Amino acid sequence: MKKKIIVLAGDGIGPEIMESGLRVLSAVEPQCTHEFEIQKYPFGGAGIDAAGSPLPIETLAACQQADAILLGAIGGPKWDKEIDTPEKGLLALRKTLKLFANIRPVAVSATLAPRSPLKPEIIAGTDLVIVRELSSGIYFGEPRELTATMAYDTARYQKNEIEQILHTAFKIAQGRRKQVTSVDKANVLASSKLWRATAEEVSKAYPDCQLNHQYVDSAAMKLIQRPTDFDVIVTDNLFGDILSDEASVLPGTLGVLPSASHSSDGPSLYEPIHGSAPDIAGQGLANPMSMILSIAMMLRQSFAEEHAAQLIEKACDQVLAQGIATSDLGGTASTTEFTAAVIQMCQMISATTTII
Ligand code: NAD
Ligand code: IPM
Ligand code: MN
């Protein structure tokens, strides 16, 4: 059966990495049980330019009807002074689709380890998942105000919102090493005190898992100092945003980290964790791996295409093992050269081995 994928390429390097990702998707489609229908819509700065809104009505309607959504990245200096910025469009999309669970895996393979700025003995074997609450907290809390001399935001969480994301984290942990680290600032923030108490309550339903709590300042340090201690990290919207960019130093670059965002009933959205990288846009320098691996996550989590997902992941790793990498990882390959190498590797692996 044909699955409808809504593609939001977005801004900056978004269209460049999306083109790479879609080329890889086409290359593995014959290995899939489903066929895919791709429909492209303007979003972010591109939405403002094309339709006067970062989230045009047609784009939102298409996303609501999708089987899955792929997003490149949005934003850039061109639109920073808009009242409705590209970032507002992204938050509106997440909120409207109730995408509360943002899953950000961080794995450092043996091929990536030597390319990280951190010592190999510290990062070798890192395999963790950040489960970031995505549709509430300080990103959305009201009231908020900005005047010339005063500004405030509201870090609000409802108990049921915390319960929902904690259940997601424990379920993910059950399929892994069964260790959940809940990260908060419960020594200061009311929202974190509720978070911690709720985490304790939810943990009772998962006696096979271990829960520990860390304050976010200390967690930020330990993430770099002893990354292999972590299995599943669950945290709020803002802390999850910050910790996941920090975690990109473990594999060496933002350019390799994918993500999936899920609701409890509608379509999921898959996107790199990084932004539109205006500093390198249009130069063929972007690392497309974050987008390509987001597509692998989509194949696995939305379409149960485990074989194709593993094929893509294995191909990326083997291309890196051959020494082919973009400049963020110290290589010389362009976006298109790296993509071509991944496609060729997918074809080679398919022709010679059985993956699962
Ligand atoms: P960024 O993530 O775009 O870039 C941070 C640094 O990482 C830059 O030096 C960039 O060149 C590098 N980088 C990022 N992705 C890369 C890739 N695939 N390959 C190689 N290098 C890569 O963050 P920023 O510069 O703070 O933000 C730029 C814009 O992106 C802003 O408008 C911001 O709001 C937006 N943004 C969007 C998203 C999203 O669409 N989900 C996420 C984060 C930031
Ligand atoms: C991300 C980004 C977004 C966020 C911005 C662009 C709104 O940083 O997806 O991580 O803060 O969630
Ligand atoms: Mn971010």
Image: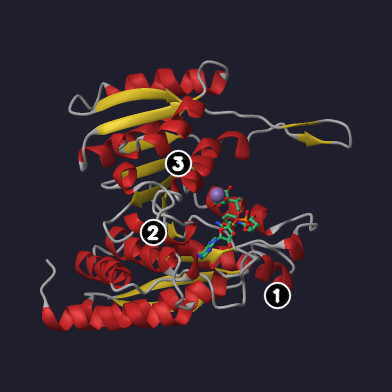
10 Å neighbourhood of mark 3: few (<14), some, or many (≥20)?
Answer: many
Q: Which circle's residue, 3 or 2, is located before the other in the chain? A: 2
Q: Which circle's residue, 2 or 1, is located before the other in the chain? A: 1
Q: How many numbered marks are there?
A: 3
Q: Secondary structure at mark 2?
A: helix
Residue indicated by mark 3 = 132
Disc 2 to disc 1, how far (Cα)?
40 Å
Q: Is residue 229 visible?
A: yes
Q: Is the C-beta separation of discs 3 and 1 under 8 Å? A: no
Type of the residue with mark 3: Arg
Type of the residue with mark 1: Ala
Residue 41 placement (x, y as % from top left): 57, 73
Residue indicated by mark 1 = 50
Disc 3 to disc 1, how far (Cα)?
31 Å
Residue 184 placement (x, y as % from top left): 48, 26
Q: Secondary structure at mark 3?
A: strand
Mark 2 or mark 1: which is in front? Answer: 2
Residue 297 appears left or right of 146: left
Q: Which circle's residue, 3 or 1, is located before the other in the chain? A: 1
**Residue at the (61%, 40%) spot, across then down:** 139
Residue indicated by mark 2 = 115
Mark 3 or mark 2: which is in front? Answer: 2
Q: Which mark is residue 192?
A: none
Q: Judge whether 316 appears above or below 137 on screen.
A: below
Residue 136 appears left or right of 105: right
